[in-house]
Amino acid sequence: MRVVFIGTGEIGVPTLRMLQRSQEHKLVGVITQPDKPAGRDQRLKPSPIKLAVRDIPLPLLQPKRIKSDQAISEIRALAPDLIVVMAYGQILPRSVLNAARIASLNLHASLLPRWRGAAPIQAAIAAGDRLTGITIIYMDEGLDTGDILLKRETQIDSRDTAGSLHTRLAKIAPDALAEAMVQLSQNRAARIPQENALATYAPKLEREHGRIDWDEAAEVIERKIRAFNPWPGAFTQVWDARHNCKRTLKVFAAAITGDVHVNVGTAISLPDRALVFGAGKGALALLDVHLEGSRRMTVDELVRGHPWIAQGTPGTAGESQPRKRSSS
């Protein structure tokens, strides 16, 4: 089959490489998002997909809008039998989907219909799901609503971050697509409608979603810390009494500790746990952090260098005094 790959994110790179190496199928073109400004100097940065094919003589399209007449014409000119989409970032119009002779497939990083949308990996961890996976669907014009061809599952470990789960799902995807392509070639591919009543949604995350709400239970906060690592990053604010200002504390890892009583949103130091924050239910011992104006470090290093941070510090932005737990 002649295949066009459409994607932007790092998660699609192993699948793209599988298509490049395929002896049975021919990769005839790649489509990705335009280079975007990044970093302090705002230099244009190519997508991971573009970087993966930069040394390969292959048509590479970067339309600003994939629904433009020019983009549609260029895709049709590639005469694809199959269009494969993974983490692209734009909704494909019917005119693009119909350019494929056999099918347009999307590889989605959840077990659909659970967690349709832009951030399924983070949503699954934050919700405490035990399973996730890759779902391959026949694309329609909806948001991850197409009929299911196949699924591949993986367990979510209690230590998984969005980063580690992202890497594992990226490794699962190529074999899932290879099997789907075999089934399509042999005219035995399933087509199972999704149960829309079971659908849940994972909208695009913004940086502010990472702000820790200490009124939530410690187990909920701990899951969100892992879910938001590396993006958008969990954070709170601590009061620097020396300079009379708030400073942002990013949190990369924490452990639930239920045997201490700490006021909600307040940080204390204990002999065996350098920094413990009180939550709405239970408490969290922070482990891996980054204090604004400093570097990423263990929490022991943080408290040794900044002892004021563990002296009854309110942990919620805007507070001047620690809050008491409710009696409920």
Image: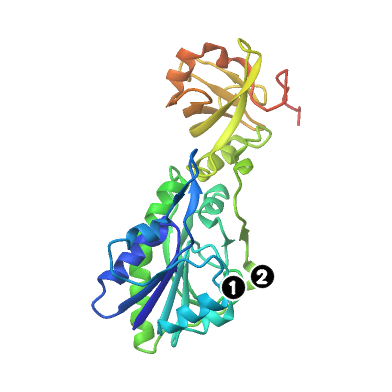
Q: In which quadrant will I find the C terminus?
A: top right
What colour scheme does the image use?
rainbow
Which amino acid, mark 2?
Answer: Ala
Which amino acid, mark 1?
Answer: Thr
* Residue occupying the far right of the picture: 327
Percent x, y of residue 67: 57, 74
| Separation of marks 2 and 1 at Cα, in angstroms | 12 Å
Please give the name of the residue rendered at 54% of the width and 49% of the height, measured from the top-left corner.
128
Residue 25: quadrant of the picture: bottom left
Label 1: element kind: loop
The label on residue 145 is: 1
Percent x, y of residue 323: 73, 22
Q: 40 or 112, which is in the foreground? A: 40
Q: In which quadrant will I find the N terminus?
A: bottom left
| Proximity of marks 2 and 1: CB atoms separated by less than 8 Å | no
Percent x, y of residue 18: 30, 68
**Dot placed on the residue nearer the N-terminal end, 2 or 1:** 1
Please give the name of the residue rendered at 35% of the width and 66% of the height, measured from the top-left corner.
16
Percent x, y of residue 159: 43, 42
